[in-house]
Amino acid sequence: MELRTWPCPTCAQDTDFEQPPCGDGHTDDGGECPEWVCTACGAAYTGGDAHPVEVRAWHRAA
């Protein structure tokens, strides 16, 4: 399995992401599957080329 290091919004640090076997046929024509999973927490990322994600906390007024 291929590993890539990207910022994980759940872990709040750079972590390794792995690409699980593609069951959707993305790689049938030699392309790359857009699905990646953080090896530390299991957060899923879809999109291939990951870019940093801004995580914001939202609070509701009482």
Image (cartoon, grey):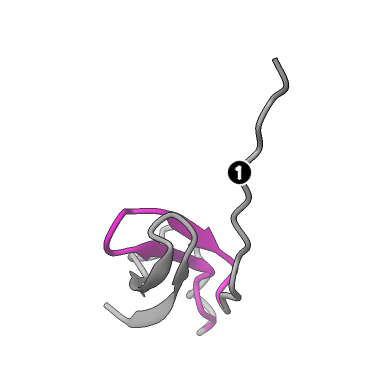
Q: How many marks?
A: 1
The reply, left or right, for residue 22 in relation to residue 25 is left
Residue ID for mark 1: 57
Horizontal placement of 34 versus 43: left or right?
A: right
| x and y percentages locating residue 57 in the rendered image | 61, 43
Front residue of 2 and 30: 2
Q: What kind of residue is marked 1?
A: Ala
Looking at the image, which residue sits at the far right? 61
Is 46 positioned to the left or the right of 43 in the image?
Answer: right
Q: Which residue is drawn at the image coordinates 38% and 59% (left, top)?
A: 11
* Res 43 seen here: yes
The magenta stretch spans which residues?
Answer: 31-48
Q: Quadrant of the C terminus?
A: top right
**Which residue is drawn at the image coordinates 34% and 72% (left, top)?**
15
Q: Main secondary structure of the magenta part?
A: loop
Classify residue 47 by image quadrant. Answer: bottom right
Coordinates of residue 7 in the picture (x, y in percent):
47, 72
On the question of residue 24 being in view, the answer is no
Tell me the crowding category of disc 1: few under 14, some 14 to 19, or many 20 or more residues within 10 angstroms, Cα based: few
Above/below status of 57 relative to 20: above
Q: Is 41 contained in the magenta span? A: yes
Assign the N terminus to one quadrant of the image. bottom left
Which residue is drawn at the image coordinates 54% and 81% (left, top)?
31
Q: Which residue is at the front of the view, 45 or 59?
A: 59
Give the left or right position of residue 30, taking residue 20 as reference: right
- Residue 52 magenta: no
Seen as rendered, the residue at the extreme front is 62
Local SS, label 1? loop
The residue lying at 58 percent from left, 79 percent from top is: 49
Give the percent coordinates (x, y) of residue 29: 54, 80
